[in-house]
Image (tube, rainbow, N blue to C red):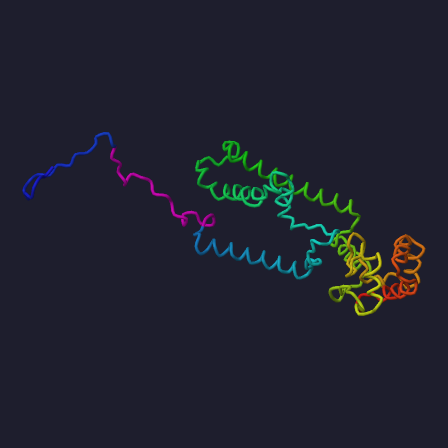
Amino acid sequence: MAHGHKSDEKIIYVGDSRVVKKNLADQPVPADYTSYPGKSEVFIPNFLLKEWMVAVVALVGVLCLVMSDPAPLGRPADPLTPGFIPMPDWYFLFMYQLLKYPYASGDYKIVGTLILPAIMFGALLLAPFLDTGKERRFYRRPIASSIMLLSIAAVTYLTVFSWHHYQQEVELKGIKPEHSIRYEEKLAEKESGVKSTGPAKKAVLVSADDPAYETFKSATCVACHATDLKGSGGPSLLGVGDKYTAEELATKIKDGSMKPHYDSSLQKGISNEDMDKMIAWLATQKKPE
């Protein structure tokens, strides 16, 4: 090698004889996509534009489906109501079921709400960096394939079992879920051929300033039906006047299944006349026209 600044000194480059020099001119050049007319095309903008058009058509189809048959909205969640069973959307049922187990709830709720979800979604994010092999056949990637099958089996089991547990709770409490009621109403509407002109009006408390309302709050009725008539372990009485007349209500309360409660109210000092006024007031509880 050259030393110093002598311009006439010969420069010798020392190389490694073990490295085989390749002639780039002999290397095959990959064919361009234009060499395959009708079988391949440039990604941007041709292929991307087609994908975008298909996505727009699919989006318009979903929007039309949503507008033609909108998902019914239930009442606002009220955890203070004993008959209320909170349920998330179906795609979160597996997480909801996971939080019912001892190791992911109570003192360990941080495990079910943060640690386990972080592990699952973190594994998805890191998968492309951890599984860098060139093999693409399913049976030649045992680790990745096993993790995928285990994840699918776990999510499916938790989702199905969560819905099964919900059905057991509904049957045990003897309540009818609101989505079932709405489905039956839609089915009856379809069979009758009478299309609803709009959402049904919600029943509300009528004549809250009536003195009979104070009698209702003082009687033993509030133990099951709550002061707002929405029900607290018993059925809701909102709109009960649409189902029964005052005479029918009096029969059910005084001589029917509610007789023990009626007698208990009389023992508390509520007069028979006040109870009659309360029954007449209950008969006015009707849905708005």
Is residue 112 positioned above or below 47 on the image? above
Residue shown at the point (68%, 43%) measured from the top left? 162
Image coordinates of residue 150 in percent, x first then y, are 58, 36
Q: Is residue 1 left or right of residue 125?
A: left
The vertical placement of 204 against 176, above or below, is below
Task: Reply yes or no: does residue 37 show up in magenta.
Answer: yes
From which residue to which does the magenta span run?
20-40
In depth, the one of 44 and 184 nearer the eye is 184
Q: Is residue 220 magenta?
A: no
Residue 168 in percent (x, y) is at 75, 43
Q: How many marks?
A: 0
| Residue 156 vertical placement versus 58 (above, below) | above
Q: Is residue 263 left or right of residue 204?
A: right
* Image position, residue 154 (x, y; %): 61, 38
Closest to the observer: 113 or 130? 113
Quarter that holds the C terminus = bottom right
Quarter containing the N terminus? top left
Residue 195: image quadrant is bottom right
Q: Nearer the viewer, residue 83 or 164?
A: 83
Toward which corner of the image does residue 9 lie, by quadrant? top left
Q: Residue 28 appears at what percent x and percent y?
A: 33, 40
Q: Main secondary structure of the magenta part?
A: loop
Q: Determine which quarter of the picture holds residue 74.
A: bottom right
Out of 138 and 197, give the one closest to the viewer. Answer: 197
